[in-house]
Amino acid sequence: MVTKFNPYHVLHGPEGGQFTSGDGDATLDSTRSQVVLMAAQDTAKKLGFDPNKIAVNEGEHPFALNGKNYQAAGLAYLDGPKAGTIELFPRQIGTGATPAITAHEIMHQKFRAYLDDYRTQREGAIKDVDIKMRGNGMLDEAGARRYPLYQEHTRITDDLHQMMRDDGVSSYSRDWWNAQEAGKATLNQAIHETLAEIGALQQTTTLANMTHIARAAPNEEGQAFLYVKPLSQQWKDLYASVNSNWQAKHNVP
């Protein structure tokens, strides 16, 4: 039996794989694919993503997560011949869900570009003999001017353990942090999913109204209780940094 409830999943191959999202169980008619594509392309334009890089697939894409089976509603291709593109599955997209699903997949593409740029600047900073890197990874003033994205990312993620405790902004993204903690997912996968969920949620709410399903630091008995808290400044800053980097690269106003 296939379970469906808005999952956002990552399938990793040797070079990074595809990010997928799933939602609903809509019936496909002769016009639905076109309606989904038009809505997705409209969302893409608003988010500064090339609408021509979005396509629809009238088939299905099953996947499993934590022992549950799902049908994907969208794929974000990060590598291979389709790298940089998004594929949507109208059969799995409920009424009105296209903007959120599209935004989720677009954020995966934006974060991939951000990570590529961060790694390039990090490599440059490490090799640069004219600047100084502190023990916490932060650069001196000269280094910060030469490698601003690296400096910003290092500042934002200085307390990475707190970001991990904050978990995700939905039960699904938090599942990825649980998987990461269990060694079944990578840190980047969990961050990818949290940012993508923020992107999806921003289609219907604001950053100020978003919350985390967070974990308190373990007590003496090793228990870490869950609680709800506003979206942390670290996650807001990282989300903003990813979008700003994309806007600068693609001349998005």
Image: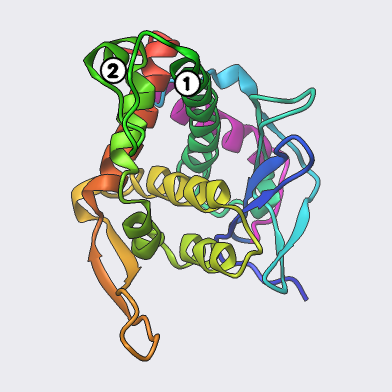
Which residue is at 71% across, 46% downward?
29
x, y percent for residue 251: 39, 8
Main SS category, magenta section: helix
Q: Residue type at mark 2: give it.
A: Ala
SS state under label 1 = helix
* Residue furthest out toward the bottom: 221
Q: Which quarter of the rendered picture does the C terminus lie within?
A: top left
Which residue is at 31% across, 74% downward?
217
* Residue furthest out toward the left: 208
Say which residue label 2 marks: 144
Mark pair 2, 1: CA separation:
13 Å
Which residue is at 18% across, 50% downward?
208
Q: Is residue 17 left or right of residue 195?
A: right
Checking the image for residue 126, the label placed there is 1
Q: Which quarter of the rendered picture does the N terminus lie within?
A: bottom right
The answer to whether any part of residue 109 appears in the image is: yes
**First in sequence: mark 2 vs mark 1:** 1
SS state under label 2 = helix
x, y percent for residue 182: 60, 70
The residue stretch that appears in magenta? 25-46
Q: Quadrant of residue 134?
A: top left
Q: Is residue 224 above or below residue 190?
A: below
Q: Residue type at mark 1: give it.
A: Ile
The answer to whether any part of residue 206 appears in the image is: no
Q: Magenta stretch containing residue 195, yes or no?
A: no
Q: Is residue 210 above or below residue 148?
A: below
Mark 2 or mark 1: which is in front? 1
